[in-house]
Amino acid sequence: MISSFIEILHGIGLELMAEEIADVLWLASHLDEPPARKEETIFQAPVQEPPKEESIAPPLLQLSQSPGSRQERKTKPSETALYPRKSKGTGSSGIGGLAFRSPGGTALPGKLLIGRAFRPLMRRVPSRTQKILDEEATARQTAEIGNPNVVFPVFSPARSRWLDVVLVIDESPSMDIWQHTIFEFQRLLECQGAFRNVQSWGVAFDSDGNLNLHAGLGTQSSRQDSRNPRELIEPTGRRLLLVLSDCVSWAWEDGRIANLLQIWAEKNYAALVQLLPQRLWDRSALGRAIPIFLRTLVPPTLKSGIEPQFEDLIIQESEEQSLPNGVSVPIMTLEARTIFPWTQAVSGKKDNRIPGRLLLLTKEANLWEKTAAETTHSLPPEEHVQLFRAVASPLAWKLLGYLAAVPLSLPVMRLVQHVMLPETRQTHLAEVFLSGLIKRIVPEDSSSTAEEVEYDFLDGVRDILLSKVLINEQVEVLSYVSHFIDRETGNPVDFRALVADPTRTEQIMIEQCNRRFANVATHVLYRLGGNYARLAERLEQFWEEDEKIEGEAGQGAETQQKSEVITGREVLTQLPSVLKNKHPEVVETERIDEQYKRKKSEYSTIDEEPIVDKWASKYFPIEFVDRVNEIAFITNIYCPPYLLISAPAGYGKSRLLENAKERFQQQDWLCLYLKLSRDKQYSVQELAHLLLQEIGVQGSRHFDLSTPENAGDAVSWNILNTQKHGQKNITILIDEAEALDESSVKQLLNRFLPAFKEGINIVEPALRLRLICAGRQLAHWKQWGEKLPLELLALTPFDFPAVYETVRKFVAISDIKRNADYQQDFAAYLMYFTGGHPGCIMEFLLKNYGSNISGFIENESGYYQKIVKPVIEEIQDHIPEDLQTIFERLSVFRMYNSPLLQKIIDGKIIDYKGNAIRLERALIATNLVNRRSGFVQDDIVRRLFAIKLREGNNTAFIDLCREAQQIIESYVQETNYHFDSVTLEALFQELQLGYYTSDQTAQSRQILAQQFFAQDGIVQKYLDILLHKPDTYDSLQNLLHILQRQDDWEFQFTLNFFLRRSDHYTDEPYQRLLHAVEQFIKQQTDV
Amino acid sequence: MKTWRIYQGTGKPRKGIQQLPEPPEWRKFDRKVPPEQQLEVDPHVEKRFGDLSRGQTFQATDKEIDLVNAALYLRRPLLVTGKPGSGKSSLAYAVAHELKLGKVLYWPINSRSTLLEGLYKYDAIGRLQAANLQEPSEIGQFLRLGPLGTALLPSKYPRVLLIDEIDKSDIDLPNDLLNIFEEGGFDIPELLRRTDTSSTEDVWPYDSQHKVTITGGHVTCYEFPFIVLTSNGERELPPAFLRRCLRLDIEEPSHETLTKIVDAHFQNLDQQGKDARDKLIEVFLQRRTEGTLATDQLLNAIYLTTQGIELDTGTKDKWGLIEVILKYLNMPGTI
């Protein structure tokens, strides 16, 4: 009997202990006799219950409840305070009952994990002030004295909690959206029971740059006088000082906050909590801070503070350069995995490397940044929007489009996020805020909270954005928001009714918020055209009149207006269908994506540069894709004035320059375009001649070009002479700039251009001058002695999607028609053979498109010799000799950092005398590789060298692959960082080894796939390793995220290519892997 | 009426605790205490100001009543979670009031609270002083039991102990409590050290001026106290701890319950007052969908209306007032 009862309990998911079962049975015997009718439901009822969230007793307590109440209970969301309600409107209005705190729930996800990350700090130390009686010692003391009448009480320090916390919160305007998050974070810390005290302080700078530091948050406290930053120092060092910020205000830029941090970090554990996700850091002031690693050298209880360890600095400039004067602070985000290493380090774990930043104490002397930022305000709105488009994440861009249809305030923004883009998070909203397209309307009442602050787009921006959003989506957004405003103000202005009958003034409360809503709505209506535009006009008039004579507006025009009114209250909700009938042109308004695609093809008119003669552009009738971002970068306002475009042969540099020239001319710039000849050496005088020719001056020999200054004068004078219609911005474009040597470049930059600027009287930002040099391997210019004011733009090779798109474009103009499968397969082989080198791809396409796919593999070495090898040799010339072999042998690794590199050196895979850090710097100094997300990676050079290796000595290559696989495997076991990317790299190595050791036939590929995906196969092996790492859940989620977003296209391509089932390239293996990882995570979370 | 219910949620004091059956075998503690040594409810203990009204006006739902009874029957602590102001603490007062269990022992937890503080406090210095002055004194003179210690004294009927905001505690406290809940008693080493198992000491309880006698330096309960632990769910509690408690999640009061609560507090509302009440409850419920509001806030608002401050719709000032009174508890910027 009892055992079957226990079985039933198990069946419904209640795992009870013996004593609990005893409790249940015992209590049941004391309950009222259930009515006979319910007898049969005794053991069935609990099945419908959500068992775990209730107390242990509910199954039995159910007995005493009527079926009705049980039903009621089921429909109520079973909610505990820990897990926020996944809000879904309960009301019929569609948004009734929505929580506007932030889409998708809490403003601080992963609370419990974060709480856990603070555990290393939960310890007690002897108090300095509080004492307790030590009874044992007292007794001993008394006994030793031997006189029972004399008692010496002995006190010992009480144990008190180790640390207290001060949160210093940046109160610059862009921080408004983080209020909830910060609030919840503070609550979380308070509730940990780990800290003596948790205080919040706000830090802000007024318009004159004066510090305002005050205890407490909110506008009330910001009116206090500023306190001294030294007040926050806890002299005994038992304090965590967390600065929470998005690091975008000027105070970060010019070192004011860095100075505060220096004061605080001296005695206490100061750290920076960056609220923005890492991908946005470069757009905050952190982009200019130097990434460093810190580690504890001395246990912190002996000496306060964490000593910076500088051996892993990433400095682009030469090795010898000493560090600038700055303060080094640990950095983290509000995620457990970034907090944990820091708390561990603070608690004294040695040799724990934690990421940090070196913040400069003074403003960095930079030639262009300030002017760029200052001029953003004077940008025309189109450019400003484009600028944001160029750097924004797709979701943020989309969100911005929707926001254009509504009045801006935080609750409304969250509402739009919730109903239109539920997948967006706080960070996307932050991105929108950082766009610089939104301004804050200074509230009349300065005590309003962040929720009440109103925002608006800069002038003109709203209309531009609205033109990019589908009309019916605008209407949808609008109607949601009008609901919301109705409810929020509590005294409804029915906007729809207003549209229908603008004369009903007596029922309308003219409140600020409604007014603004109506204003925005009129914008939208204008865009609908036709009757709606007229309606909008009327509305506008109405508001204006209303402003003048309150309550009496529109009386006179009543009769006339009523006849034009569009029927009914539901006009807004009906709009989309109405529009289709009446205004077909409006409905065709493009979606943002489509428009973007069109633009992309507009921009991407860059072609091949004829460096190797056989690649002359006349042979290449099609255009390269994927240079949209570069063009946008070059021609936008943020672009540094002196730019260096460097890339190996065949990357489309010349084409890029030509396109840039075209864009500049469209924007009414004066373009001076010079194409040098690689075989010659040019002096500045010769450059001046060429420039004069370009301006159209004949007989330039008459001018005094004896010194660079004179030459600059002469050129500027001639430009002024030829410009009749006012002054223009000027850009000088130099192609094949490798023909310039060090001294002429220095003369050009340091002497010619200053004289030139002075001659024309160029004062940024009123008038701008740009110099853009393009050429092969120009990166070493940056290393010439003194620091030249040049910024480097390296062109990237093609990724697989770009190759595929190139093929498709080619097919569109080619006579040879093949089906889509063929195109995809062809693209895959192209990728495999060329490594994504644009020039090779073009040649391959022209020569071989249409030929038999199965013939490719057999002919591989033929293609290699003819097409790829010359390119590799060309690149090799630019590598210092001692690094050539190292580069070649390292090409089996897709990425490495210094620990991994050390293992590679130790494993004698490469022959290098120094340590890994030195090698890493040497490699980066070649400008052929660069550092991305903590690893040195490189694109084309590595792949080309790998191709060279496998084509050259195949056995040696396979040996190398084997060693590489072993090294990575042992590295995965050891490391505690970047599990996601390291795991992918390990899988890559396994694939590479498996593929090249097999005979690469369809059959052996099948076998490899089986090994890869089997129950105890390779994938499983690495996932199991992940299980034993800290923050498993986070790492797994990150891995899944990378796979889902297809961030690592090379891995995706390799997987699909190596495990292709037939000869067709499909995405099937990748999907299989994705599925496997998903399943694994599901299993783990179930456990 | 369900006959098994001892606590019925009526708010009227009644005899009922006598019907509580013997505890289950595994929750029997020291049943050997002879009746004459069992402590009765002390009628002289003054109740805290407001305890009475809290006990009278609390409106219990069916679920709450059932779980209270289950906890009483099973002699297990009741862990109550719920939003601020949903009546977590009031539940303890209501039970004490209705079942005539005496004063509620109140132990507010902060992050510095320790188990020892809940059990007893020993004034060693005082004793030393007394010894030096050669004053004749018993050790019991320098011992005062804490709220938890007092609750565990061998009373005839369970004492009511309210441990407030357990989730604010230091990380170790829940585990320490766990042991006490299992044992149903504790030792006082200061007494153990100097006495044999049968000798007695008189010590001060937490809330009374009458000393109680402790035998052998050990306190064990006769009836396990009725312990209510409240939590705002801010932190996870150890699973082992959760397993030992009955868990009750108090839901936010519904429209109907709110009306009952208001009526319990304002018994003489006229028709006009009732209209205002209904209207305010509407507003309250609507606002509560977007943030946390405590029932107290509603009561404040209604109190204002009964004092002649009319909260008509329309004018801006009055709505502003309502906004202040019904300000969300979980929003930043509230100081």
Image: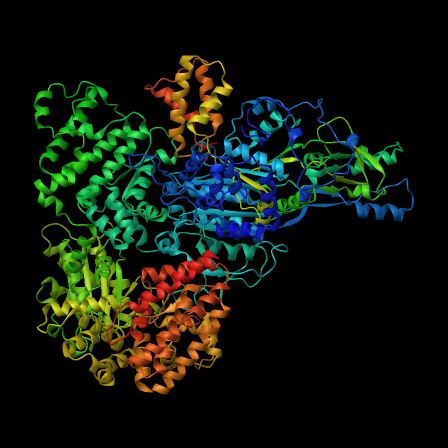
**At which x and y percent is residue B226?**
63, 35
Q: Nearer the viewer, residue B47 or A954?
A: B47
**At which x and y percent is residue A404?**
23, 41
A254 up-or-down from B21: above or below? below
Q: Quadrant of residue B286?
A: top left
A115 up-or-down from A840: above or below? above
Q: Nearer the viewer, residue A1033 or A756?
A: A1033
Residue A619 is left or right of residue A746, and the answer is left
Q: Which of A221 and A816 is in front in this view?
A: A816
Residue A675 is left or right of residue A4, and the answer is left
Q: Which residue is drawn at 44% across and 71% down?
A: A1016
**At which x and y percent is residue A78?**
44, 41
Can residue A265 be seen in this snapshot? no
Can residue B147 be seen in this snapshot? yes
Q: Nearer the viewer, residue A611 or A780?
A: A611
**At which x and y percent is residue A752?**
24, 63
Total marks shown come to 0
Furthest-front residue in view?
A36
Q: Which residue is drawn at 91% across and 42% down?
A: A148
B311 up-or-down from A738: above or below? above
Residue A915 is left or right of residue A156, and the answer is left
